[in-house]
Structures are given as structure tokens and as C-alpha cells.
Image (cartoon, rainbow, N blue to C red):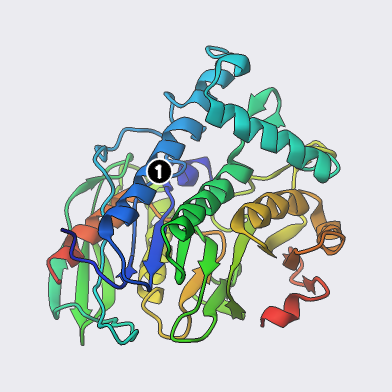
Amino acid sequence: MKVTEGIMGMSVAIEVLDECDGSDIDEILDYFHQVDETFSTYKKTSEISKINRKELRIEDASPEVKKILRLCEETKSKTHGYFDIYVEGIIDPSGLVKGYAIAEAAKRFIKKGYKNFYIEIGGDVAIYGLKNGQKWKVGMRDPRDRRLTKGVLHLTNVGIATSGTYERGMHIYDPIRKKLANDVESLTVIGPDVYEADRFATAAYAMGKKGIDFLDTIDGLEGYMITRDGKEFLTENFRNFM
Amino acid sequence: MKKYLQITVVLITVLVAFYIKETKSSFQSKPTVLSIPSSPTQTVQRGKFKDGIYNGSIEDAIYGDLQVQATVSGGKLTDITELMFPNDNHTSIVINRKALEILRQEAIERQSAEVDIVTGASDSTPAFARSLYTALQQAL
């Protein structure tokens, strides 16, 4: 499984339906690269790797890293400790950074006046405006068979993120029970933006089956869970998107 | 001036961004976007490739070289086969065959007219994507 992880990168997709200057897209891609250079736990030269090797103190890290670590702490307290980037002394903020970066990119697009677009990294998406006058049609990949989708959502002005194991092996740690989370096959969260969706998907996934109840307690979040034994659970208003 | 106005569909996309375990790959340059311009009528034009069979570049997939061949038929990407894939040892073959099968499905699936976006935990390998990108560039 580790080997599989080793050869896996993630794909990035951006679709803009408004008249679009290509340099704006290049800017976003540059930004993603920069985020990767800074936060990758795999790249030896990233600040996060340096912090983990004790070559860099958090106090001496860049403002971006400090900001992300602050957001991680805030998320931890909002999720009863389930969102925890420290596993055995090693920092891994990837459960939040991806969503943060996509949301940030979307904000920059909106600032430039774009209205109808989506930005996706590795299955997590910021979705804005309409396509052909209708909400965007978003297929949820079936974790059991990636060629299939588990229904189609109709989305606009939201973020959507999925935590799951799929082919990468179990990669979310349950900090409370001190083991890898494995009750849940996949958990998809829709939120006001993809940052919220991503960080709460990570935390609620680590909670196991009760993660879906946790999502119900937070305004603006809806979730769809498939458990390891094949059962499906929805938050109260998830169906509104179907 | 960039060619892509009005719409940029990143088809099979690619770049590398997150979580590449080692920086062994030679992919250092800026990521490239495969874009398909559309008409001003908001109709998304898919399937704009020229029919043919196109070989992608040979890419370093960390455990060996990888090269894909893209088949375009009726303007659409209909198949991707590996001309070369990492096969140093048995484990690698099993893993990569599985991974490539998934990636092939994913790449073809993105053209599906049923949905605009597919969400879910998604993986792809940079080497696969880069090779496929160079193949499809020839089809534009």
C-alpha cells in the first residue's frame, strides 16, 4: 500500500465558463505548486518536512505555515480533538491544506470577476455559478467501484470534499482511539466552501460512524457516508442537493 | 496571448501538485493545462480531438518508465494502453496494473456527458498524466 501511495500524485482540474485569460489559470496553478512546495509531507525541502526533522522551529516558519497551523488548532477544538495534525510527534496538515488552497484559489478567481467555474484537486472541488443555466452536475464516485457514481448532485456556490480510503490505503488517523480510522469507507461533505468541507470531512471521517451525527450538529454542512459494511447514511438535508 | 478564451476544460489534467512522495521525477517545470476552447454559445465542446493513435512521452514513474498510448475515435478519447510500465518486480507489476486501470477509467470517465464533475477521493500518477498529456497534445 505504501508503494501505491508513493507513485500517486493528484490531479488538478479547472473549468471556467466565463471569458477567461489563460494567465489567470496559470497563476492559480503556480499558487498550487507553491502550496505543495511549502506543505508537502513528502517533499524533503518543504517547510513541513523541515519542521518534522526539527530543522525549523514553528516560530521561525513562514506566515503561511503559521496560519495553516493556527487553523489546524482551531479546527481541532471545533471537532472535539478529532482533527489532529500531530501523529506520533509528526505534523501532517494535509487534511486541511488541500481544501484551504482550493478555497483560496476560488476566492482569487471571484476577485477577478469570474462567476461560473470549478476548481478541483484530487476529487475535492470548489463550485461556483452555473453551467448552461443550471447547477453543476456532480457525480459522487462509488468507493467500491470507481467506474460508477453514487448518484448525481446539483451544486452551486459550495465546496465538496471526500475523505475515504479508496486505493491509497487507510490514511486518516483517529487521534482519540489512537488508531487508523477504518469504520467508514467514504465520507463526502458539502460545505459553504471547500475549506470547510475538507477539514470537517477529515475530522468526521476519523470519528467513524458517529461522524455523520457530528456533521448534523454544524450549520451549513451536509454529509453522505458509506460505511465499511456497505450502509449509507445522510445528514438531514443532504437530499436537497440530489 | 493564451489561446484559451471562454472556457478551459482541463480534461485529464494533471499536474502534480500534491503528495508526490519523492521528487525523483523530472517534472520541475510549470504545470501545463490541456485546454479546449469552446464556442461563445456556452455549449461545451467535448470530443474535439482528431482521430488517431498517439504515443505519449516516456516518463519516470519512480519504479520504472511509463508510456501510454491514447486512442481517439469519433473525436473522443476511447482507450489508453500502456506501452511501457514499471515492472521491475512482481509487486510493482500488480500495483501498477491496478493503478493504471483506475487511471484509464478516470481519464475516459471525465469525458462523460452525464456529469460535469466527479467528486471523491481521487488519485492519479504524475507520470501517467504527463505521458497522456503529450499524447493528447498531438490530437488537438
Tell me where residue A177 appears, x and y as whole percent: 84, 39
Residue A28 vs residue B99, the one in the foreground:
A28
Q: Amino acid at mark 1?
A: Tyr
Tell me where residue B38 appears, x and y as whole percent: 26, 79
Tell me where residue A234 appears, x and y as whole percent: 78, 73
Residue A126, above or below A154: above
- What residue is at 41 percent from the left and 68 percent from the top? B106
Residue B85, above or below A85: below
- What residue is at 61 percent from the left and 32 percent from the top? A67
Name the element at disc 1.
helix
Circle 1 residue? A31
Label 1 crowd (10 A; few <14 / some 14-19 / many >=20): some
Q: Is residue B96 visible?
A: yes
Which chain does tag 1 point to?
A
Residue A127 vs residue A93, the one in the foreground:
A127
Residue B109, above or below A85: below
- In the image, taking residue B13 as reference, residue B58 lies left or right, namely left
Tell me where residue B19 appears, x and y as whole percent: 47, 41
Q: Quadrant of residue B119?
A: bottom right
- In the image, taking residue A165 as reference, residue B110 lies left or right, namely left
Q: Is residue B123 visible?
A: no
- What residue is at 24 percent from the left and 37 percent from the top? B26
Residue B72 vs residue A120, the one in the foreground:
A120
Q: Quadrant of residue B41?
A: bottom left
